Amino acid sequence: MGQPFYSIVNSFVQANVYGIYVTTLILCLRWLVFHDESWKRREKLNIPMLCISIVVFLLETAGLATCFQTTLELQDANAQGFNTLNTINSAMEYTTLQIVDAVLIYRCWVVYGYSWKIVLLPLFLWISSVVLSSYDLSLYALALNTTDPDTAAKLGLLTLQIWDGFFACNISVNIYATTAIVYRIMSVARNSINPSNRLSQTWRIIAESGALYTISTIVNLIATVLVGMDERFNLFQVTADPINFSMAGIAFNLILIRVGQQRVAEQAKSEGNKASHWLSTLRFRNTKATETSSSQDPSTLHSNTDYQHV
């Protein structure tokens, strides 16, 4: 099995996962652009999240198009064209993963009351990943102008090692930030007088989406390490890489989708409780029930930290 076959497999896998990504994007835009219970456009849009969603979509789409073109270049035996497009595709993948990681770090920063001390480590790891990706792309560019096969082989091996370092930073950022966010939300819920169901649902959403993205990155890292040791693992690597690329966007969208759905469920439940209290008061004139229903949870983290607005 040669490079053209691996490129076809890569394109096939990426096209399928891209379809899942587009589905989540459509649902994500629905919660970002329209009101929760209608198709009326929101008066105040969350511009930062909307812009990030669109940028990630453009990168994912361009990545798929580049992947298809790379396959065509290999079918035409155009090695130079393949290497050029491969460099462009790597740049888009790096950028997508770094954008998603940056948003995760920002969310962690907000949840901890804008404390820089909490995000120093993930911020350092994120900057390290930017440096590694920049260095890797410079090696790709150098390889494009290299005619010596031995030099090209050495550069190729070095780029794989840099990929390993990049993914190690990426995984560390995800595990740290996700764990920190979940711990913070759980702590607030545990210390609340009236623990909110929305808080427990929120930390589950963050944990599940973070795990989905982190696991795909770990698998991709394992595949990259194995390919560096034995080329027989090429099929594993060309399958794991496009899944990880699209999974970053999918996990990002899923958080926004599920938080939006959760908010609607909470509103419906709250309205149902209010109606129940009203009927109880009407029938039995129990003023104590009315007073009890007006009490509020002193913890407002779940209302102040809406992940559609972070």
Image: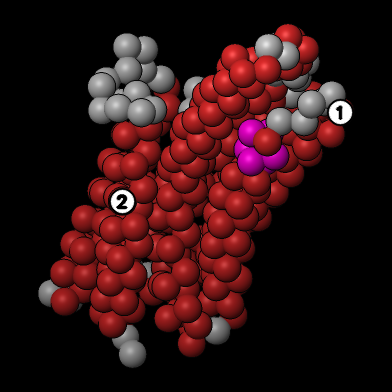
Q: Secondary structure at mark 2?
A: helix
Q: Dot 2 surroundings within 10 Å: few (below 14), some, or many (20 or more)?
A: few
Total tally of numbered discs in the picture:
2
Q: Position of residue 298 (x, y in %)?
A: 77, 15
> Which mark sits nearer the N-terminus, 1 or 2?
2
Q: Is residue 265 visible?
A: yes
Q: Position of residue 201 (x, y in %)?
A: 64, 41
Circle 1 is placed at which residue position? 191
Residue range corresponding to the magenta coloring: 198-203
| Horizontal side, residue 193 vs residue 177: left or right | right
Three-letter amino acid code at disc 1?
A: Asn
Residue in view at x 32 percent, y 86 percent = 2
In the image, taking residue 151 as reference, residue 163 lies left or right, namely right
Above/below status of 174 relative to 265: below
Disc 1: CA contacts within 10 A as few (<14), some (14-19) or many (>=20): few
Mark drawn on residue 23: 2
Query: Height in image: 44 above or below 95?
Result: above
The answer to which of 282 and 263 lies nearer the viewer is 282
Residue 54 image offset from top left, x and y in percent: 31, 34
